[in-house]
Every structure is written in structure tokens, then in C-alpha cells.
Image: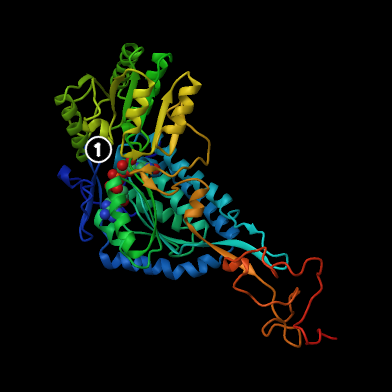
Amino acid sequence: MSRPTTGPTGLAERAPHAVPAAAVGTGTGTGTGTLTVLDPRDDSFVGSVVEAGREEVADAVRRARSAQDAWMRTPAADRGVLLHAAATALRERADEMAALNGRETGKPFDDALGGVLAGADTLRQYAEIGPLHRGRSLVGARDAADFTIDQPRGVVAVITPWNDPVAVACGLIGAALVTGSTVVHKPSERCPHVGRMLGEVLSGVLPPEVLMTVSGGGAVGAALTEQPDVDAIAHVGSTATGRRIARVAALTGAHVVLENGGDDALIVDAGVDPVWAAEQAAVGAFANAGQICTSVERVFVHREIAPAFVEALAAEATRRNGRHELGPLVDRRLRDEVQRQVDEALASGASALVGGAVPSGPGAWYPATVLVDCGPRMTIMQEETFGPVAPVQVVADFDEALALASADRYGLAATVLTGSIANANRAVAELPVGTVKINAVFGGAPGGSAQPRGESGAGFGYGPELLDEMTLTKVVHYGSPVLTATGRAPTDEVAVDAGPGRTPHPQDPAEGGDPDAEGASDAEGDDQPRVHPGQPAEGG
Ligand code: NAD
């Protein structure tokens, strides 16, 4: 594992000094301030970054706009080649970037490295599938050609969070760039150095200003979304922010893709092995210290296996805490919010079997926590808890579990552990979420992408469908020209096979007319070029 001994690229080096914890990634960047980052493992000073001002944000959009025309005209295959080069450049800096990510967010090195490599892989995937993204051929009149083409949106604002900063950003940036848009990226204020380094690494192999990066907090993100020249906004982050962005975009007309928060349920049905179910719950709730959008947020366990399941889950949590397996939370602000939700649950009748309290000492550590006797009115069961907390509610049967899991304002994902095909099928059909997982909390095939339901977002933020989000479809109808006496179109050197001469008619299919109407296929069985009636054919 290599670690930067000095600062990361572009890091504003300063002598380590005490910085108030409240200054870390407060998300209140005004566009005129400085972001100060402390290492959440020990509160040591990581660095500081000056936020972009409003005019710099506007300038970044202007530059991205200027670069877009040439980028759009670059053949898609060549854009793919450049994305491959960007992926290679990222891999070459993967260790350095993962170590920096660890310093800024506390992500354990292997997890952070996995995220950087996943980012490089995602760039490669879009480099490959981007040039294959294509329109459809349509069936119109026999003497016409009808099809769709996809065109780039223009300038895309990509606004990303801190919990998997490289992988998430690379997906959105890759899909936008390969389809011919240019990008202005606003990385999270909680990992501004990683965001800036990513921009430098990728920009190093891309044409100038195809990818711009602006540093700052929420106000800088807001300033970016307010730019009238931004054609699309892709935001991965909290639901509250996503809703704000959607309101702004309603005024500017920008297309919006939102991948936001989740409150994922885990249903543990009767009849499954409680130890296996507890392992699944622990992985789902404690991976990345619970800071994953699809973390297990609520556990509904059938009363028949509840005692054995809860005991095994408590053992999983205790084991992880004993081995110090979890990294810290990203900062104390987040930890305070997690503790607030836990305290409220405890005051409302829940009990902590494991964890449930802030440890003493530096950093933003929080233990794997198991809460029992939770109920649906508790905030911890209604809200996303971005920390390693598994709140458990015992249910009478599968019906109750399904009803409770479905009664939620979020709709990102859910998992069901069951041996019953009937119950699994019901869950797939009825759960109002974008992703349903049966008998595995994580996993799934490459390319799986769904629109989040409810307040978890809108549109496809991943997979091949993200290419659709990043493009606009145009329907094209080619009819046949009516030729002049020379049989040549005025500006064509060589007249295209004219087909039967006819003028466009409002009833043509492309005009929304009836393709079966008289005249819609008047060339049936006749492939000879024609000229307008009464005019001699060319050379005739
Ligand atoms: P956040 O919404 O606070 O911040 C994300 C980004 O939005 C940051 O760059 C931030 O500066 C920016 N931002 C904040 N206010 C803004 C505004 N008014 N206008 C424009 N931009 C603004 O989210 P976060 O705390 O960084 O990330 C955690 C959240 O992200 C969790 O809710 C998690 O579930 C979610 N998330 C979702 C997915 C997914 O795929 N659904 C993936 C990762 C994270």
C-alpha cells in the first residue's frame, strides 16, 4: 500500500494544526470559502481546498460548452479510445488515490482501492458500449427511410457524493463523455482532494476542457445547477439535495437523473438458517460502516426464527467490533446524526444488544450496532441511517413484513431471505423499489440498472440505460425528393436514387399520419427512379 507522504496532487499544503471538527465537510460551502478536511480516523489535518466562486462555476460551464462541439464531432469510437486511456491513467494512480480516499473519508484501503478500480472498469465499459449505443430503424413507407439517432445532451453537470467517490463519478462522467457531451464535475466537499485528483488524472488524457472540475460545497453545487447553459444534471447523493436540484432544474429546463438515498428493508422469512441470515444482515448493515446507499436499513424477522437470528446478528456485530473491522464514519457531523437516531430509538423502547454509543477518543468511529424491539414509527426505521446500525423488528408473518417493508417513502432496493418461491415472487411483484434481491444482500449481474422508486431518485443512474439518459433521441424520416429537370438536387454532386417522386404530405408517417393511407406506399413493386410528371428523365 503506497501512501502519499506529502500532499496529493494539487493539495494546498499547510502545517498541520487544529481545525474545528465542525469545519470538516460541513456542506455549507458558500462559494467563497475554504474546505478543510480532517482524517476521520484520527482528526489529523489532510488539507484544504479553496472553493470555486460563482464566476468560476459559470466559466467552467462556458468552457465545457466551447469544447462540446469538437468533442461531439469526434467519432464515437475515438471517444471510446480516449476513455480507455483515461481508465489506464486512473489504474496507474489507483494506490495513491485509494490512500488519499482513506485519508479524506476513512474508507479502509482495500475498499477504497476497489472503488478506484471499479471506476476504471466502468470507464472501460462505457468506452466499449458507448460507441455501440445506437438508434432504431423504423418501418415506414417502402420508398422512405425512417430511423432514430441519438445525440449528446450538451453540457452535463455531474454532482457526486463521498461514500464511493471515484466509482460513482466515473460512471456518470464516462457515460456523458462517450456519448459526446462535455462534463462539469462537482465532487463532494467531504473528499475535495480525491475529486480534484480524479479530474486531473482523467483530463490528462482527454482534450482540453472536455471535463472540468469545480471544488466546493452545496452552494457551489447549487450554483452549477443554476447555470442556464447546463443541459443535464446527474446527481448522486441525498434525497434532500436531489429534491432541491429537481426544483432548480424545473426552472432551467435541464434534464435530471437522480440516484438518491435509500431505507432498504431486509426481510428474514421463517425456515431459513438464522446464522446465514445474520451473516447476510451483518454484511448488509455494516459494510463500509453502513455508508452505502443500498445498506440494510431495516430488518423484519419472522418471529419463529427471531431469537436465534438476533443472537447470531449480535455475535456478528461483536466479532466485527472486537477485530476493529469497520472504518470510521466520514466525519463527526454524520456520527452525531447516527447517534441522534439511535438515541431516539432507545428512548422510544428499543434496546441496544451491541454498540449504540459514541466511543471516546479522536476520529469519527462508531461501533457495529444491533437494536431490537424497534417499531415503524421510529426515525431509525423511517429514515436512512448512514452508519453501521441494524435495527430489528419482529413480525408475525411474511404478510406483515411485506407490508412494513413497502410502507416507506424511499424505494431504492430491498432484500428477502426466504425458502419460499411463492413469497419470493410476491416480494418481486409487490415491493415498491428499483432493485429486489432474493437470498443475497449484495451481488447482481453487471449492467443491472433500475429507476429508483419514491424519493430515492429518478431515471437510470447506471448501466447501459444511462447512455439513454445522456442522449436525446431524434426521429428521422427520409422521403423521396421531387427532381428538377436535370434530375439533380441543387446542392448534390450526384443525385441520390430518387425513388418515386412525391412531395411530403401531412398524412405521412413522420407527420403522425396513417402509414396505410393511400399513397403511403405507392412505389410497391417499382424501384425505377422517377421525375416529376411532365419532365424528362435525366439524360432522356
Ligand atoms: P449530498 O446530497 O449531501 O451531497 C452530494 C453532492 O451534492 C455533493 O457534491 C454536494 O456538495 C452536492 N450538493 C449539496 N447540496 C447541493 C445543492 N443544493 N445543489 C447542488 N448540489 C448540492 O449527499 P452525500 O451526503 O454526499 O452522500 C450521501 C447520500 O448519497 C446518501 O443519502 C446515499 O444514500 C446517497 N447515495 C446514493 C447512491 C445511489 O446510487 N442511489 C449512491 C451513493 C450515495
State the image quarter where residue 251 is shown: bottom left
Q: Residue furthest right?
A: 540
Residue 7 in percent (x, y) is at 31, 48
Dot 1 falls on a residue whose secondary structure is loop
**Camera-nearest residue between 194 and 501:** 501
The residue at 65%/58% (across/down) is: 137
The residue at 36%/13% (across/down) is: 305
Left or right: residue 74 compared with residue 233 = right
| Vertical order, 269 against 482 (above or below) | above
In the image, what residue type sits under mark 1? Pro
Residue 469 in percent (x, y) is at 47, 54
Residue 216 in percent (x, y) is at 27, 55
Q: Quadrant of the N terminus?
A: top left
State the image quarter where residue 329 is shown: top left
Mark 1 Cα-neighbour bin, 10 Å: few <14, some 14–19, many ≥20: many
Asked whether mark 1 lies closer than 8 Å to ligand 1, one says: no
The residue at 51%/61% (across/down) is: 180
The residue carrying mark 1 is 40
The residue at 23%/60% (across/down) is: 31
Residue 111 in percent (x, y) is at 40, 35
